[in-house]
Structure formats: structure tokens, C-alpha cells
Amino acid sequence: MNLAKRKSVAEDRVFNIVIYTIAAVLIIIVLYPLIFVLSASFSDPNQIINGGLWLLPKGFTLDAYTKVFHDADIWNSYKNTVLYTTVGTIINIILTTLIAYPLSRRDLPGRNLFMIIITFTMFFQGGIIPTYLIVQNLGMVNTFWAMVIPNAIATYNVIVMRTFFQTSIPWELQEAAQIDGCTNFKLFLKVILPLSKPIIAVMVLFYAVGHWNSFFDALIYLQDDTLYPLQLVLREILIQNQAAYLDELGSFGMADQALLAESMKYAIIIIASLPVLILYPFIQRHFVKGVMIGSIKG
Amino acid sequence: MGLRTERAQKGAKKIAPAIKPKKRLWKQIIKRYDLYLMLILPLAWYIIFQYGPMYGLQIAFKDYLPLNGFWGSRWVGFEYFHRFFSSYYFWRLIKNTVLIKLISLIFAFPIPILLALLVNEIKNNRYKKFLQNVTYIPHFISVVVIVGMLNLFLDPESGLINIILEHIGIHPVAFMEKASWFKPLFISSNIWTNMGWQSIIYIAALSGIDPQLYEAARVDGASRLRRIWHISIPGILPTIIILLILDIGHFMDIGFEKILLMQNDLNMASSDVIATFNYRTGILNGEYSYTTAIGLFDAIINFALLILINQIARKKTSTSLW
């Protein structure tokens, strides 16, 4: 018996060592590229290209950031993204709440029909081209509206929010308010919304991060580059290697230009991801909550 | 007898609100008119931006001319479908789409499950939280930045990976321009991005398992691996099945935005999929009817697969979407 116990303790220890090691490897795999990008953005580009950089910045410099901050295209697109994200998220929240609440009411005749209508769209869609043609017919192509209207509701989020209303707000409370002569709309404004701050926070985060990171709608709907969001400009710089912004580096020699362009890429990545990553520690808890609520119904 | 009818009447009265005769229903609807008013705007959006495109799918069978609109264009039957099926690109597109999905199902789908099981076994709470928080981060990075990072790291001259390869005496490889490297890179970077985020649901499911089960198994002398095998995995099996159904239901939906970003003339042979072909031919070249037909073909296969897999799951495991 004693021997068996000792054996199981030893087994447990080996098991723990294996598990903690795998976890450590995973953490390194995820973090290393991110730290490298951060360090590279502060480093002398010569060091990056020659492999002198491994973890911490080598030849610390802020050149890349200075250059990025002086680029008019990048700033303009940054402004656009902030605008699309703010307005788009407000529209998202209003529409999502307006549909999620009535559909959460168990006493609403016809709500199952409405639910079928909206959930069907999760599994079958008209596709890119017909959607594009609708947006085009509405005259939204190449306008601000194309960035905030066609994606105004995400059905998954409607379902998450509806589940929250159904499970987190006591039905008795709503019944009591109605008996007191409260109209449904007043009930919604005065009772439901104040109780829904946590889910609204989750929705703001889901939608806002979506807007901030999206590029495809902009790619198909926008032609005018003064309307471009940040992600499209990033695509040109990082992926298509379009060096329009290099012209502004006139004071440097050719070789230096190419070099600086390299470290600018790292700086741009940091600047583009920073708002989300700075907020990350505060918001990840909420995001996780959102996924959990969604999975209850799942 | 009399008593019985009285009782029956009483019963009927009780059931009455549930049955809702017509007049009652109207009353109920009118009483909640403001709830319906709230629905107007969002439902209008669904009709225009979700059902509008579905109505527009008819141009798959028509020669769409913008002047004539969806309805007024001339019918051509299955012409575009025939054209697609006999197209030079047809098999290449199908092969790439199906292969990317299958490889993802085999390699990427199980990773979040394994990660969740790993997280569940870590007893040190701070380490556990740290692991979780770190693995969630990439989910918040945009696709453009992720593909941008791939480009930077894999650059044949200045990329970190090739610098390392050179150090150990291997010739640099232009990974992003090699067709053979496209699928491994696409899928492994997907795993890097999504494993943490997708593990959340499994972790939640694992936390719902009764701790007494583990305790009982421990007393019976089951090793930790055995406990994972006999308690943890069966405990989250319904969740796994639901997510598998959803994944297969979006069979053709393989992260096309990222493929588009990773695609270039040199890796086309293994990166061109139905959705990217559609984007090029439809949006860039304006062949609206042809690409709508291809999109419809794609959507129907997805939908059929979803129904099929859901049916199978319901029969075999009693877990299903509906």
C-alpha cells in the first residue's frame, strides 16, 4: 500500500513536469514573435537584417516611429479607422439591443418565427457578389456608409445578447414592472438597459475589435484611398510592399531607405495593434464572458 | 357525470391562456406593439442585407445586367454552372478548398481541445491564468498584421527564420512564394492565432464536470492520464461534437480573407480556393452572374453538409444542433 502510494506520487510528479514544460513551450511560441516585433521596432535596422537581434532591442532608436508618425497616409487611415470603429460600434449596439431584447421575451407572439429568420442567415447566405450588388444599388459603394451599414448586425452577437437577457434578468422582475403598468419600451429603457451593462460592454468589445481589425469590406467597397482604413494601408505596406511612403524618406541614401522601411514595418505593426493590446488586460475577462454566454446555447 | 364536466371546464379554463384563441392572440400582439416597433429597424436590416442577397442569388441563373436589375435580367438556366464545372480551374479550386479544410480539421481542430485539457491539469492558479491570457492574445491581432508578420519573419533575406537557417548552414527559402509551403504555413499560423481563443469553450465545459468524479477515480487508483481519458474527455464530448458540426457546416468557409492576403502569383497552385477565385472574377473582373453561380454552389454544399452531419450526429450520439 505504501509502495503504491509512493509510486503514484512519483507518477504525479513526472506528469506535472511534463505538463508544465508543454505549457512553458506554448507560452514561448506565442510570446516570442510578439516580443521580437516590439524589439525590432525600436532597433537599428542593420541589426535586424544581420541577425543581431534575438530578444531585446539592439541599437535602440526611435527613427522608425518618427518616420511613421510623419506619414500623412498612415495618419489619415488611422483617423478613418477610429471613425468607422466608433460610429460602426454605436450602430451595432443599437440594432443588436433592439432585436435581442424583444426576441428574449417569452411572451412575444411570433418570436420563434423571428428567431428562425435570423438564425437561418448563420448557415446560408447570399454570398459576396449579391451582397456587393445590393450595397452598390443602394449607392453606398465608395462611401463612409459601406463601412458601417452592411455589417450592422452580427447574428452570433444577437444570440449571445438574447441569452443574457433570458438568463440573467429575472422574469419575475419584468412581470412585476408590467403589472405596475410599465409599458414595454419603458421597461426596456428603465429596467433592462441598466441591468445589461456587462453584456453591452462585451458587445462593444466584440464589435469594436471587429471593426478595428477588418479589411475586407474596405477592400471591396472602397476605391478612394482617402477613405481607406488603417488595415488596408497596412496591407499595402506589409504585404504588397508598396513603397509609396518611401518617397518621403528623401534625406536618406537608397540603402538606408530600404533599411529604414524594414524597421518601419515593425513600428507600424505595433502602432496598429497597440490600442487593442493596451486594452487587452482590461477587456479579456469580458471577452471570455461573452464566449461563455454564447456557449450556453451553443 | 356533472362533476366530471365541471372539472373538465375548470381544466379548460386553466389551459385557455396557453391555447390562445384568435382574439386573445390579437390582444397579446397589440399589447406588445412597442416590442414589434423595436424590431422594425433590425428586421429591415436583415431583409435588405441578408435576404436581399439571397433574392439576388437568382442571377446565378440569369445574364445579369445592372440596368435590368435582379429581376429583369434574361434567364439562362444552368449555363454558368456548366461553365464552372467544365472550367480549367474547377478541380484545382475544389482540391485546394477541400484539402485546406481537411488538413485543418485533422490538425487545427484538436489543438484547442488538447490545450483545454492541459489548462485543466495545471494546479497552480497563477501559472494557469498566465497561460490562458497569453494564448488569447493573438486572437486580437488583425489578419493583415498576422500575414504581415509571416512576411517579415519568412523573408528570404532579412527574415528571422532564414537568418536562423543560414546559421545552421541551410540555404534560405522563400517560404511565402512556394506553393508547397502555403498550406502548412496557413494552417500553423491559424493554430497560433486561434488555439487559445477556441479553447475557452472547452475550458468552460471542463469546469462543469463534477469534481467528485475525479476524486472517486483517484481513490480507485486511476492515473491522471486515465482520469483525463475516462472523465474529462467524455465530459466535454457533447461540446466537441457541437463544434465539430458547426465547423463542418462551414466546410467551404476556410478563412478566405487570410488566404487572399497570403496569395501571390507564385503560390497560386496551392492557394487558389473557390472564395478567392470568386473575388478575382466577381469583384475585380465584374463577372457577377458567373461568380454568383459559383457562390451558390459553394453555399449549397455547405448547407447540405451541415444537415447531413447534424443528422449523423443525432443518430449516433444524440447530440445535435437541432
Image (cartoon, coloured by chain):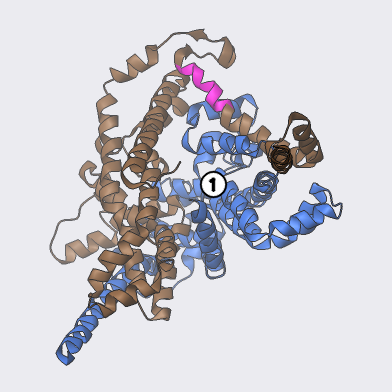
- Mark 1 lies on a secondary structure that is helix
The residue positioned farthest toward the right in the image shown: A181
Quadrant in the rendering for residue A45? bottom left
Label 1: few (<14), some (14–19) or many (≥20) C-alpha neighbours in 10 Å: some
**Observer-nearest residue: A274 or B70?**
B70
Residue type at mark 1: give it. Answer: Tyr
Q: Magenta residues?
A: B52-60
B58 in the magenta segment = yes
Query: Can you name the residue that lies furthest to the left here?
Result: B169
Residue B76 position in % (x across, y down): 44, 8
Chain letter corresponding to the colour brown? B
Q: Is residue B196 shown in magenta?
A: no
Quadrant of residue B94 within the rendered picture: top left
Please tell me whether the stretch drawn in magenta is mainly helix, strand or loop: helix
Residue B168 x %, y %:
14, 66
Residue A48 showing in the rendered view: no
Q: Is residue B30 visible?
A: yes
Chain A: what color? blue
The residue indicated by pointer 1 is A156
Give me the residue at 34% from left, 43% from top: B313
Residue B271 drawn above or below residue B206: above
